[in-house]
Image: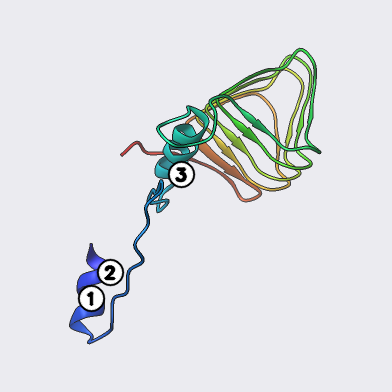
Amino acid sequence: SHAYGRALSDGRRILGYPASGYWNDLGSPASYLQAVDAVLSGKPDLAPSGSFRANHARIHSNAFIRNSSIETGAVVEENCRVVNSIMWEDSRLSANAEIFNCIVGRGVSVSGSHENEVITVNGFRSIESE
């Protein structure tokens, strides 16, 4: 990687830590989604498959949630679809909204249909696949 080469040429030390469990580089939104997908899909030695719903998340009974992480304080209103996505704390999906392969930032309200996007208080941008 460029960072390692630069650090070594500057005479800096590179340290490592041996890990025996699951590890993933979360250096991009796409790799972040892949890591969450791996955990929720029950890849070897990981958590059981399915979606994660934090205790204080509110999800309407007719919302469709698949392979997604819904964090504390997040709200998913009626007739919503959340697939392969992450909703951070206190985010909201308005009625009839859909997100596919998206990351919704903390405190963000989303309406309409979104696919392959990072959605934050500053707007949204496409997630480029790696």
Residue beneath disc 3: 32
User: Where residue 3 is drawn, which disc sits there?
Assistant: 2
The crowd level at tag 1 (other Cα within 10 Å; few <14, some 14-19, many 20+) is few
Q: CA distance from mark 2 to mark 1?
A: 5 Å
Task: Give how far across and how far down residue 13 sits, in percent.
Answer: 28, 82
Is tag 3's residue or tag 1's residue first in the polypeptide sequence? 1
Q: Nearer the viewer, residue 52 or 21?
A: 21
Is residue 83 found left or right of 63 in the rendered image? left
Taking the spot 20% from the left edge, 72% from the top edge, the residue there is 5
Residue 110 vertical placement versus 13 (above, below): above
> For numbered disc 2, what is the local secondary structure?
helix
The quarter of the image holding the C terminus is top left
The amino acid sitting under disc 1 is: Arg
Taking the spot 61% from the left edge, 27% from the top edge, the residue there is 51
Taking the view exactly as shown, the residue that stands out farthest to the bottom is 11
Task: Give how far across and how far down residue 36 sits, in percent.
Answer: 50, 38
Question: Contact (CB < 8 A) between labels 2 and 1?
Answer: yes
The amino acid sitting under disc 3 is: Tyr
User: Where residue 6 is drawn, which disc sits there?
Assistant: 1
The quarter of the image holding the N terminus is bottom left
> For numbered disc 1, what is the local secondary structure?
helix
Q: Nearer the viewer, residue 62 or 108?
A: 62
